Image (cartoon, helix red, strand yellow):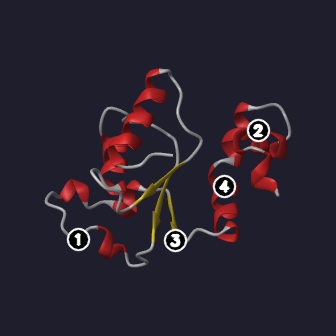
Amino acid sequence: PACDGEQALAKIDELSHQGDEYALVMLDVFMPNLTGVQVAVRTRLGAYHGATMPLVACTAADDVAEWTKGYDSEEECLPIEIFDDAILKPVNLNALIPIMACWVLPRLICFNSESPISALRAQMGDSAFR
C-alpha cells in the first residue's frame, strides 16, 4: 500500500524499472500530494506509456464530476478514459470480486500454467479466500 500519490507512482516506477507491473492498481481518487487521477494520467500518458496494468479508481464520490473539481489542466480531467474500472468506498468483497475476476484473473491465466484459483491465491494470498 502507498500512503499518497507520490509513493504510489514511485512503487509503479520501481516495478516498471524491473520490467514488471502490478496485476491491478487501486488508486484513491483523492489521495494526498498526487491524486489518483494524476497518478493514473502519469502512468498512462507519461513514462509508463503503454502500461497495461488495470487501474481502478477507488472513491466515496459516486459522481465522476466530483473527481475533477479543482484541476487546472484538461489533461488531468480524464478519469473516465484513464481508469479501467471504479469501485466505491467503503470497498466490500462483493464489489471487489467482479473487478478482480474481470481484470486480474485473465492476466493470471495468460501468465501462469496453474489453475486460475491457484494463481489468484498466489497473487493475493490465502487470507483473501477466507
Q: Tell me the distance, in whole angstroms, between the alpha carbons under discs 3 and 1.
A: 19 Å
Callout 2: few (<14), some (14-19), or many (20+) C-alpha neighbours within 10 Å?
Answer: few
Q: Tell me the distance, in whole angstroms, between the alpha carbons under discs 4 and 2.
A: 14 Å
Q: Residue furthest bottom?
A: 63
Callout 1: few (<14), some (14-19), or many (20+) C-alpha neighbours within 10 Å?
Answer: few
Q: Quadrant of residue 22?
A: top right
Q: What's the amino acid at mark 2?
A: Ala
Disc 2: which residue: 122
Q: What's the amino acid at mark 1?
A: Lys
Disc 4: which residue: 100
**Closer to us: 130 or 47:** 130
Disc 1: which residue: 69
Q: Residue furthest top?
A: 18
Is residue 113 placed above or below 115 in the rendered structure? above
Task: Identify the mark nearer the N-term, 2 or 3.
Answer: 3
Task: Identify the mark nearer the N-term, 4 or 1.
Answer: 1
Callout 4: few (<14), some (14-19), or many (20+) C-alpha neighbours within 10 Å?
Answer: some
Q: What's the amino acid at mark 3?
A: Lys
Does 126 sit left or right of 74 as displayed? right
Task: Identify the mark nearer the N-term, 4 or 3.
Answer: 3
Q: Going 56% across and 46% down the picture, which residue do you hit?
A: 24
Which element is circle 3 on?
loop
Q: Going 36% across and 36% down the picture, which residue do you hit?
A: 49
Q: Position of residue 71 (x, y in %)?
A: 19, 62
Does 31 sit left or right of 90 as displayed? left
Q: Position of residue 25 (x, y in %)?
A: 51, 48
Q: Which mark is residue 89?
A: 3
Q: Which mark is residue 54?
A: none
Q: Tell me the distance, in whole angstroms, between the alpha carbons under discs 4 and 1.
A: 29 Å
